[in-house]
């Protein structure tokens, strides 16, 4: 079902856009040509499960202008519901595509998040990959709530076209949505641990594992302390099956 021109699928209360990379990039390209503020989120199975326990967080995700599914678990869930998502997407890859669009248009980006020094390292990699893209500024994500207005002023002083926020769920999503009317940007996107990947501090799974949807296995092998978090994936799929079988509330919207 389409709402406001968007075809979305309801997976445990989170409304995900049924679009592929091409259509998503077309939307962002239009966003970057305007002066409206648009927010992009990329929930995976873990985020969807967490939002089920927090209605406010679910509303934050559903208020985003693009809600792009991230991870094989969400793709499997869409198949269980009988309305497969058009393509498996990842937040990191979509971020790279957005940066390429911005370089073509000669736009600027501000990097917010990560540990002290990490956004600067990520910015150096972005300059290497996209020399035509301007880095408007950087700031780490370890600031206190009472410093939020100061951070907003720092960002607004630079007036970036794109704001990448890497502070983890739900902090990054809340920051973007709740301060949307205060911040100056055209497109803001929550990018999780992408700065760590760009900076070289964390490695991505080999391409063959990415294509096979096994990035979760690579993370488990290389970061075994994530085991408890990884257990969310089978629990998520169990919840999806239960809702598919016994609930009439799970529908396309």
Image: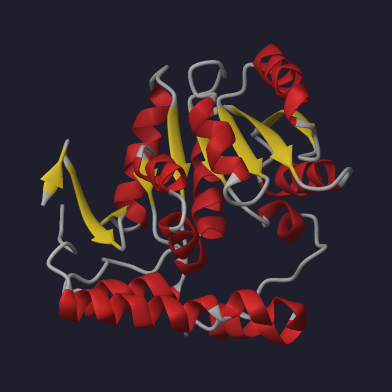
53 horizontally vs 75: left or right: right
**Residue 205 can be seen in this image:** no
> Which quadrant of the view contains residue 38?
top left
137 is higher (above) or lower (below) than 79: above
Q: Mark yes or no: residue 119 visible.
A: yes
Percent from the top left, x then y, of residue 36?
40, 20
Q: Give how far across and how far down residue 21 sits, in percent.
A: 37, 56
> Residue 237 at what x, y percent from top left?
38, 80
Question: In the image shown, does 4 or 205 lie closer to the viewer?
Answer: 4
* Residue beneath the point at 27% across and 67% down: 85
Task: State the colouring used for the structure image.
Answer: secondary structure
Closer to the camera in the image, 140 or 31: 140
Q: Residue at (24%, 79%) from the top-left corner?
A: 80
Residue 224's image quarter? bottom right
Relative side of 33 to 126, left or right: left
Q: Report the side of 73 relative to 129 (left or right).
A: left
């Amino acid at each position: 079902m389409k709402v406001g021109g968007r075809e979305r699928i309801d997976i445990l209360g989170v409304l995900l856009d049924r679009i592929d990379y091409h259509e998503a990039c077309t939307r962002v390209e239009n966003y970057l040509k305007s002066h409206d503020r648009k927010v992009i989120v990329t929930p995976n199975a873990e985020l969807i499960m967490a939002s089920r326990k927090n209605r406010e967080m679910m509303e934050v995700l559903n208020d985003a202008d693009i809600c792009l599914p991230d991870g094989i678990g969400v793709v499997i869930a869409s198949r269980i519901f009988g309305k497969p998502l058009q393509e498996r997407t990842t937040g990191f890859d979509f971020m790279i595509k957005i940066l390429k669009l911005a370089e073509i248009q000669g736009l600027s980006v501000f990097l917010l998040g990560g540990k002290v020094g990490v956004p600067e390292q990520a910015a150096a990699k972005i300059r290497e990959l996209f020399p035509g893209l301007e880095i408007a500024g950087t700031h780490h994500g370890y600031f206190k709530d009472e410093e939020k207005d100061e951070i907003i002023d720092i960002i607004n002083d630079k007036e970036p076209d794109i704001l990448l926020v890497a502070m983890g769920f739900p902090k990054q999503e809340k920051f973007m949505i709740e301060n949307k009317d205060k911040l100056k940007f055209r497109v803001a996107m929550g990018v999780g641990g992408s700065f760590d990947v760009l900076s070289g501090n964390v490695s991505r799974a080999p391409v063959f594992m990415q294509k096979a949807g096994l990035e979760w296995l690579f993370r488990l092998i290389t970061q075994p302390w994530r085991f408890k978090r990884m257990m969310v994936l089978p629990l998520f799929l169990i919840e999806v099956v239960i809702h598919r079988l016994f609930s009439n509330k799970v529908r396309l919207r």
